[in-house]
Image: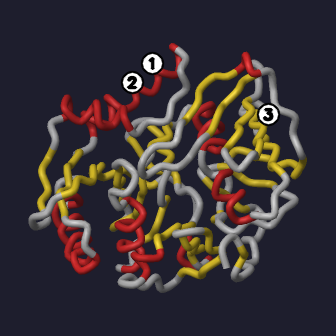
Amino acid sequence: MDGRVVEEIAPAESPAACFGFRVRSPLPLQYLRYGDGDALDLLGPSFHHPPDQSALLVEWLPRPGRPLHARLYTDGDRYHLWSSGDEWFVIDPRAGSILLPETHDVVGREERLWGIPAALCYLHRGDLPLHAAAVQVEGRAMLFAGPGRYGKTTLAAAFHAAGYRLLSEDQSCVRYTSAPAVIPGPAMLRVRRDVLKDLRLPGAQVVAEQGERVSFAVDTAARGDCRPVPLASVVFLRRSAEDIRLERIPPARSVPDLWAVTFRLPTPTDLHRCFSAITSIAWDVPVWNLYRPLRAEDLQATVKRVVATCLADG
């Protein structure tokens, strides 16, 4: 069943939102929430001719835990994103539009849409993209960050299974005005098959299966809207063979870790703005290291420990 849509889910009623955008699309989408925001038009799908190779801005090479291979080009106003499936997205943040590629993998295309293409749009808007999952607990957001294979999605899925609202499972949008807040992203979970042997996901439906991952769409009633959720804490995931342990990270020491999970463009203006944002987060929000064994039987205890420790000090 690899790559095949398993179950169709009707798109949310218009207007539908993601990452604080009011999304207008000719195509059905699986992961939108209710709400409003800045207009984002999805165009196409169409085939796209690659830009001049001299316009290469940045390249992401595959590495352990992150098989993505992508190149980002710019022609001044727009971005042209190539990914290893030979797909091209054309992103125009100023116009608020993204041209989608032609593909038979419509669920996978939407999942890729809410990655780098969406991040470029809300980065232009002034928000901060972080490579982190996010959940809502008692009206506040918690971010889980770390390298691939450290269990961000699995922990987010465990919080969902425990009845907490999923805000984002891999990439989070943080807005910093008077205080930091997380703007909910796509209502999706992409969970490894081996994890699903030990973890049930009530309130979520399978929409596709691809390789070792199964894609779930959170039920509409549990998605909520796209209003910003105040950020209570940031938790960096660490591996440990011992018991579950949390330690508070001093602000100055947390800056390099936050910088490592920040999506930014290699321009002086963007680097300065993103660095300013993460230093503000480091000083205003409690940041933690979570050491834990990557065992399914410890997930429930991990959720309880994180809530009891990090939320109480948030």
The local crowd at label 1, few if under 14, some if 14 to 19, many if 20 or more residues have their Cα within 10 Å, is: few
Categorize mark 2 by other alpha carbons within 10 Å: few (<14), some (14-19), many (20+). few
Q: Which mark is residue 276?
A: 2
Residue under numbered circle 1: 272
Q: Is residue 250 left or right of residue 43?
A: left
On the image, the x and y values in percent for residue 58 come to 59, 26
Q: Residue furthest top?
A: 268
User: Percent x, y for residue 23?
Assistant: 74, 54
Disc 1 to disc 2: CB gap under 8 Å: yes
Above or below, 18 relative to 76: below
Q: Earlier in the sequence, mark 3 or mark 2?
A: 3
Coloring scheme used: secondary structure
Q: Secondary structure at mark 2?
A: helix
Please report contact status of discs 1 and 3: CB closer than 8 Å, yes or no.
no
Circle 2: residue type = Ser
* Label 1 – label 3 distance at C-alpha: 24 Å
Q: Label 3 to label 2, Cα distance in Å?
A: 26 Å
Q: Residue at x 43, y 52 (%)?
A: 65
Residue position marked by numbered label 3 in the rendering:
95
Q: Residue at x 69, y 81 (%)?
A: 6
